[in-house]
Amino acid sequence: MSDSDALTPFLFEGQHLRGEMAHLDASWRAVLERRAYPQPVRDLLGQAMAATALLIGTVKLTGRLTLQIQSTGPVRLVLVQCSNNRRIRGLARWETLPDSGRIGDLCPNGTLAITLEPEAGQQYQGIVDLGEVSVSEALERYFAQSEQLPTRLWLAADDQRASGLLLQRLPAEVYEDADAWNRAQQLASTCTPAELLGLEAPTLIRRLFHEEDIRLFDSEPVAFRCTCSRQTIERVLQGLGHEEVRDIVAERGTVDVACEFCGQRYVFDQVDAEALFSGSLPATPSRH
Ligand SMILES: [Zn+2]
């Protein structure tokens, strides 16, 4: 198995059906290196990462897509973000896990939200209940509600790779081969998680759909990249307020913030911290 970190689009010739396969290798391991996720959390985050890569290849967007699972715990948050140039990052927050790996026990009262933030124009958010279903089923509901396109997903993750397969039926006046959509879903459903994780996209797609006329497009690279910066952290500190930041500096000497996605540390000493508020506040008594 070679590292690929790629999104591979394909279509069924003449069928108004498209598909896509996502493989995340180094980008997935970059996420795993930053935190020791227990297996049920890791599996959920990996599926969410693969799904997010598939979504960025599916929705027409110049900007950022966020997939967010929230619940009342133990897995409180799964958060994955990907830009249209396929730079992806993700994290999960959890507490003591139950013995059961069922999604309803890991994420009680769970919701799955997809947020599209275009560089220009209106932000859009669609939310579906997670309930007792898998991430893939919740996303199928999302597509039915928000995009009104019949869409199916198959997702898998282990400690090396996160993979996903997506099939989508495109709008058409007439479907000449009325059974093509059913047939494609049935063939894709024969794919095991081991195959999804172990086989490269061209091999798996040809194997699953060998009797169909498939056009495979060039793979598009996906990479881990965090979008945090000193400026984004500065805005967070400004949001905390002058008093709060001043208290932290008084207590600890510096404000030391680590990015939750990538682990990058940002340190603000007393002068840096005061400078954050120098433009926005009336002159404060001299501290010299
Ligand atoms: Zn970061």
Image: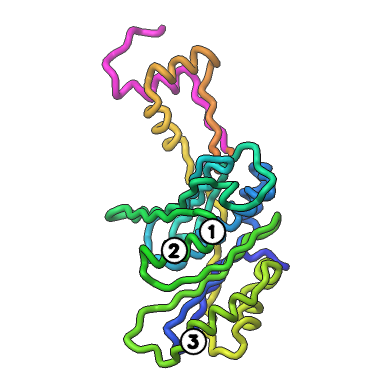
Q: Earlier in the sequence, mark 3 or mark 1?
A: 1
Horizontal and vertical percent position of residue 85: 46, 60
Q: CA distance from mark 1 to mark 2?
A: 10 Å
Q: Where is mark 2, residue-wise? A: 141
The quadrant in which residue 222 appears is: bottom right
Judge from the rendering whether residue 256 lies leftward or rightward of residue 97; answer left or right: left
Q: Position of residue 125 (x, y in %)?
A: 36, 53
Classed neighbour count for the residue bearing mark 3: other residues with Cα under 10 Å, few (<14), some (14–19), many (≥20): some
Q: Which residues are magenta?
A: 264-288
Q: Residues within 10 Å of mark 2 (few under 14, many from 20)?
A: many
Outermost right residue: 1
Could you tell me which quadrant the C terminus lies in? top left
Q: Are marks 2 and 3 in contact (CB under 8 Å)?
A: no
User: Disc 3 marks which residue?
Assistant: 180
Residue 262 visible in this rendered orientation of the protein: no
| Measured Cα–Cα span from mark 3 to mark 1 | 26 Å
**Residue 272 magenta-highlighted:** yes
Q: Position of residue 24 (x, y in %)?
A: 61, 61
Residue type, label 2: Arg
Q: Nearer the viewer, mark 3 or mark 1?
A: 1
Residue under label 1 = 133
**Horizontal side, residue 91 vs residue 227: left or right:** right
Q: Is mark 3 within 8 Å of ligand 1?
A: no
Mark 2 and mark 3: Cα distance apart in space: 21 Å
On-image quarter of the N terminus: bottom right
Instruction: Give the residue at x 56% y 89%.
Output: 212
Give the image quarter of residue 128: bottom left
Q: Are marks 1 and 2 in contact (CB under 8 Å)?
A: yes
Callout 1 secondary element: loop
| Amino acid found under the numbered disc labelled 1 | Val
Q: Is residue 61 magenta?
A: no
| Residue 92 position in % (x across, y down) | 57, 44
